[in-house]
Every structure is written in structure tokens, then in C-alpha cells.
Amino acid sequence: MTAGGHGTDGVERRGLMFVLSSPSGAGKTTLSRLLIERMTGLRMSVSATTRAMRPGEVDGRDYLFVDKARFDAMVKGDELLEWATVFDNSYGTPRAPVEAALSAGQDVLFDIDWQGTQQLREKARADVVSVFILPPSAADLEKRLHSRAQDSDEVIRKRMSRASHEMSHWAEYDYIVINHAVDEAFAEVQSILKAERLKRERRTGLVGFVRGLQGQLQG
Ligand code: 5GP
């Protein structure tokens, strides 16, 4: 999956797929929101899901809320770049908006689990940059899940018991950020994105840029 866009320094480069994963409650949603607000050239991939809408969520902004029949039709129609079952619900990334963003030279931010990350990596390894967010402690994770107050106690218990399983995939990720404080974690995630944007191998316009420079120097 390639795309031609321009970096902030004007040199053409391929768009990248920036993946944030974590056990729920580790602060990934806040970090994603801050990235979208504060970084230019980055678009959020809005996933489709069969899970029920939580209070405060908006259809089309947080997720595309679909029923199982529609989700299955999306899978069958090859409309999803990746998909997985998480907490008994289906989640998947609609392909078309991602491809449109990448070919317009935008980077795309994904808030998806390890199963989805594996699938993206298989499809577009060179373009995927993955970050795993860890909570500083189990107590901190539990506190955050409770303070969200969006899920029932039973759902929270289930999420806590799944957290350890989800965390077991940390070593498959390119970067690990421990979210002690959201400002620091944000600064770290932002640095990763900024550095990855400068990677030589995705800066397709560099050969021409350097040739141009050399031409000017010699002429
Ligand atoms: P939640 O229900 O709390 O919004 O999300 C539950 C989990 O599903 C989170 O770990 C989130 O990253 C993951 N998730 C959300 N959207 C997708 C998706 O499109 N694909 C995959 N594989 N996981 C997703």
C-alpha cells in the first residue's frame, strides 16, 4: 500500500499506518484524540463494530455502529482491511477511507487490538508503525476502567481479566510506551510519529531532492 504525499518539509513520502494498541483503560483513546488534535496530516481510522454504543459516543465519529448482518456483509464484500472479535463483539477497519487517506498523503491512526495489528503488518509491513501502551500498574488500570463509568462492573471484571492476555502481545510491537502521565506519554507517542515520518525509506522524494541540491551546488 503506497501513497504519494508531501512531508512537512515538502519532500514526497509514503503515508504510514500508525497503530496504537493497549489493554482497554491504559489511556489509548485519550492519546489518540490528542494526536488527532495536535498533529497535522494524520487521520483517525473509524472502525466498524457490532458492540452497543456507550453514553457519549457518536455514530460515525467513534465507531460505525453496525449490526451483525451488516458486519458480516462487510467481511464478505472484502470491505475491511482487518477484523477481529474482541469481548464477544466484532470490530473491523473499513478499507476505503484508509486507502483514500494514504493516497492523499495523509498518515492514518488506528486504535485496534493485537489481532488487527498482526493483519495490517502482514498486508503492509513497511508502512505499519506500531505502539503498545502499557498502564503503570494493575491498580491504575482498574481505577481508569472504573472512572470511565461507561461499563458495568461485570464488563470491567471481564476487561481486567482480558488485560493480561492482551498485554502478552507487547513484544510484537515496534515501540512500548508506559502511560504514567498522559502528557509525557503523549510527548513520547508524538516523538515516535515525528521520527518515523523522517525515515529515509519512506521518503520517496529524497532522491530527487538531493539530486536537485547537487545540481544547484555544481551549477
Ligand atoms: P472498545 O469496545 O473499548 O472501544 O474497544 C475494545 C478493543 O477493540 C480495543 O482494544 C480496541 O483497540 C479494539 N478495536 C477497536 N476497533 C478495532 C478494529 O477495527 N479492529 C480491531 N482488530 N480491533 C479494534
Image (cartoon, helix red, strand yellow):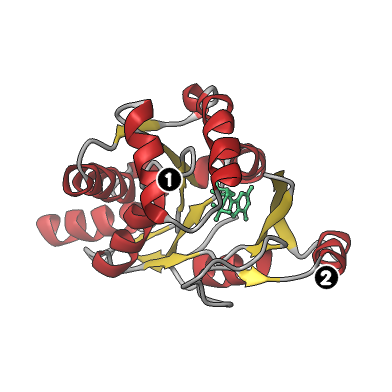
The numbered disc on residue 145 is 1
- Of residues 202 and 58, the one nearer the viewer is 58
The amino acid pointed to by label 2 is Arg
Give the residue drawn at x 39%, y 41%: 26
State the SS at label 2: helix
Of labels 2 and 1, earlier in sequence is 2
Give the residue drawn at x 59%, y 32%: 162
Residue 104 placement, left or right of 136: right
- Residue 169: x %, y % from top left: 54, 26
Q: Mark 2 or mark 1, which is nearer to you?
A: 1
- Of residues 214 and 84, the one nearer the viewer is 84
Q: CA distance from mark 2 to mark 1?
A: 30 Å
- When asked about the image quadrant of residue 38, the answer is bottom left
- Residue 130: x %, y % from top left: 45, 40
The amino acid pointed to by label 1 is Leu
Q: Which residue is mark 2?
A: 70
Residue 204 placement, left or right of 181: right
Residue 203 visible in this rendered orientation of the protein: no
- Residue 215: x %, y % from top left: 20, 59
Mark 2, Cα crowd under 10 Å, few <14 / some 14-19 / many 20+, is some
- Residue 136: x %, y % from top left: 29, 29
Q: Quadrant of the C terminus?
A: bottom left
